[in-house]
Image (cartoon, helix red, strand yellow):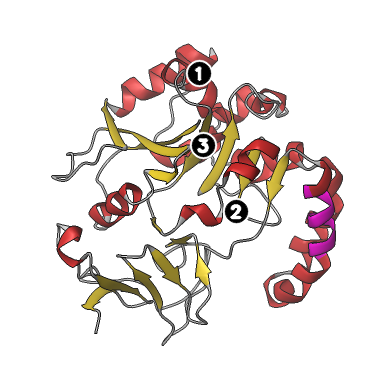
Amino acid sequence: MHKIAIIIPYFGKFPEWIDLFLYSCSLNKKITDNITIDWLIFTDCELPQKIYDNTIFIQMSFKDYCQHVMSCLHIDFSPKTAYKFCDLKPFYGLVHESMLSNFTHWGFGDLDLCYGDLSLIINEERLRKYELITTHADRIAGHFTIIKQDSIYSKLCLKIVDWQNKLNDEKVLGLDEMDLTYLVRREMVDYLRLYRYLGKPFRVGIYNFMKFPNIVHNWYSKAFIKEFYTSPLPKTGEQWVWDIKNNHILNPWGKEIPYLHFLFFKKTPFWDTPNYWKSGFYCLPQDISIIKNGIVIFDNKSISYKNKE
């Protein structure tokens, strides 16, 4: 039996789409008869009205959570904002070790997404063969990574150079998607540097260049690293559609993806565009089950829905 816990600390105020997020979690409670997923959410936010069996909230203050981190890792950890938790993600298995005894795997993720059919990523063969599963081709994905308990990857974070001081630094340094990536894929460092150096305009072509070493890596490594195209750059007129009843998310070209990451739909420092979600963009009812036979439409203007014809 494979039991997965995805750990998400979140403090302040939940995003407008929290009900959508939680409902999408509930549809992935049981991937197969032998695979289940729970989400452990540590928060000081007001709890949503609708909570599911596999969305487990642990209420605590931001200060108390940071103190818990300090006691577990024996470091000074007093960030001004929760955004610093991006650097903490590789350490979640250690920070929450006492809560993970009943799980075979732990992982980290984000709230700014909607899950579709996660069996596109997670299946029994991959969980038997690999000890780390992630959804980018060139790096560890901060928004979805699964790690096997007691594997070499559970404590690999302790090999990050100067990790204590890096966690104490106020700046977000990319320990999840940069430092951990280099430890998991040491042999790929030169490829990764070239990939980033060539820049965004060439990334589709460069991905073909990257594809062969990725395949070879997955042959012999215990880490499964594959691009699932879950963080798109939405253009005006493009739509991603979630068929709720069948739990399928289709991109604008009709290809199914396991989840949709909202990073570039929101206003973000990582992409300069005037086309992002603005006030009033969220147009779904609080109880998502009301529209469970319909479809949810994501574009760079809104999250909306319509009934299936």
Residue 92 falls left or right of residue 17? right
Is 240 magenta? The answer is no
In the rendered view, tell whether residue 232 sits above or below residue 92. below
Q: Mark 3–mark 2 contact, CB under 8 Å?
A: no
Label 3 vs label 2: CA separation? 12 Å
What's the residue at 33%, 71% (across, down)? Answer: 277
Disc number lying in front (1 or 2): 2
What's the residue at 17%, 39% (across, down)? Answer: 46
Position of the C terminus by quadrant: bottom left
For label 3, the residue is 107
Name which quarter of the figure residue 41 lies in. Answer: top left
Label 1 vs label 2: CA separation? 31 Å
User: What's drawn in magenta, residue-wise?
Assistant: 210-218
Q: Is residue 174 visible?
A: no
Nearer to me, 220 or 196: 220
For label 1, the residue is 76
Q: Position of residue 4 (x, y in %)?
A: 47, 34
Q: Position of residue 184 (x, y in %)?
A: 74, 38
In the rendered view, tell whether residue 3 sits above or below residue 283. above
- Callout 1 environment at 10 Å: few (<14), some (14 to 19), or many (20+)? some
Nearer to me, 33 or 101: 33
Name which quarter of the figure residue 280 lies in. Answer: bottom left
Disc number lying in front (3 or 1): 3
What's the residue at 84%, 53% (across, down)? Answer: 216
> Of the residues shown, which amino acid type is indicated by label 3?
Gly
Q: Position of residue 64 (x, y in %)?
A: 32, 20
Local SS, label 3: strand
Label 3 vs label 1: CA separation? 24 Å
> Of the residues shown, which amino acid type is indicated by label 1?
Asp
